[in-house]
Image (spheres, helix red, strand yellow):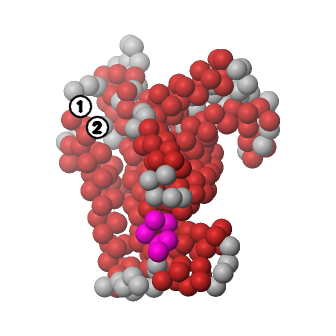
Amino acid sequence: MRSYIIRRLLQSVVVIFAVTTIMFLMFRIVPSDPTAMMVERGMSEEARQALLERWGLTGSLWDQYLHYMGNLLVGDFGNSFFYRQPVWDVILPRIYNTLWIAVPGLLLGAFIGAGLGMIVGWSRRGGTVERTGILLATVIRGTPSFILGIVLLAIFSSWLGWLPGFGMGDTNGKEGLARFLQWEFLIHLTLPVLAVVIYFLPENLLLMRSGVVENRHEDYVELVRAKGVSNARVAWHAARNSLLPLITWLFPALAETIAGIVVIEIVFSWPGIDRELVLAVTRQDYPLAQAAFFLLAVMIVLANLAADLTYGKLDPRVVYR
């Protein structure tokens, strides 16, 4: 077990190193000049060179790479070209904003999807409930997230007028946690979270349904049924052992949710890390884009590692070699 963890950690380090290197090269080979937004009109050539040297954009590609990796090892991503402030000061608030829609959306999607999956999986094979559930999951899964967001905006914001459609609302001068606990923020949070819930609902429903179908005729389920307990209790025993794939899927799903809701953030004008990443790429803001990519890559790698380790704890049949 210990050797397996060490080997997986080393593999994770190699993957993160490869991702950071690819990111560095990607932003250097694009045919555009990221210094255009930094260099002011009328600036002398000496001042321009001093500014470029300060941002680590002088010298050969190899020199820039060493400068970039050296700063990365100490957690220094530099200053944003666009905002003219440290990258961490720009990224951290937007990560919190993204977590507010990613975490509740994923957990609610898992809870609701598991419940519906248990009902669909325990229903009569080929019956109306099973066919309806599979059809619903297939349609939602095949619907692009931006169309889902637009439909929610059209119904609940434009047509019914129940919920605001864009942004986070007025902060009323509040900072920190108090900013996120006011009614104005929570009402603006509703539609983005609902979009994330619906978007990830089919995955959970189908996973749970497959597990229940596979376990409903196992010997331990037949034994519980032979004891004369209610059908709902028998279904729960089959569903409980079907949760294993769903639980282990949640770890990488959380990281992928944080990295993959960029369209939802753009549709609802939500100031999250994914939306800011797109803006940073279009602005050629190297430090901000590289830091965002790096954090997302680290989250995905660590989430997959946590899923592998958790699976062995939940299922004693799994043996690490």
> Is 303 situated above or below 194?
below
Residue drawn at 61 percent across, 52 percent down: 112
Question: Looking at the rendering, in which quadrant would you find the N terminus?
Answer: bottom left
Q: Main secondary structure of the magenta part?
A: helix
> Is 153 situated above or below 277?
above
Q: Is residue 187 left or right of residue 22?
A: right
| Residue 171 visible in image | no
Three-letter amino acid code at the position of disc 1: Val
Camera-side residue: 1 or 114?
A: 114
* First to last magenta residue range: 212-217
Q: Which residue is mark 1?
A: 30
Mark 1 crowd level (few <14, some 14–19, many ≥20, 10 Å Cα): few
Camera-side residue: 259 or 283?
A: 259
Secondary structure under the numbered disc 1 in the rendered image: loop
Three-letter amino acid code at the position of disc 2: Phe
The label number, if any, that marks residue 27 in the structure image:
2
Mark 2 crowd level (few <14, some 14–19, many ≥20, 10 Å Cα): some
In the rendered image, the residue lying farthest to the top is 42
Question: Looking at the rendering, in which quadrant would you find the C terminus?
Answer: bottom left
Camera-side residue: 204 or 41?
A: 204
Q: Marks 2/1: CA distance?
A: 6 Å
Residue 142, image x, y percentages = 40, 38
> Is 237 situated above or below 165?
below
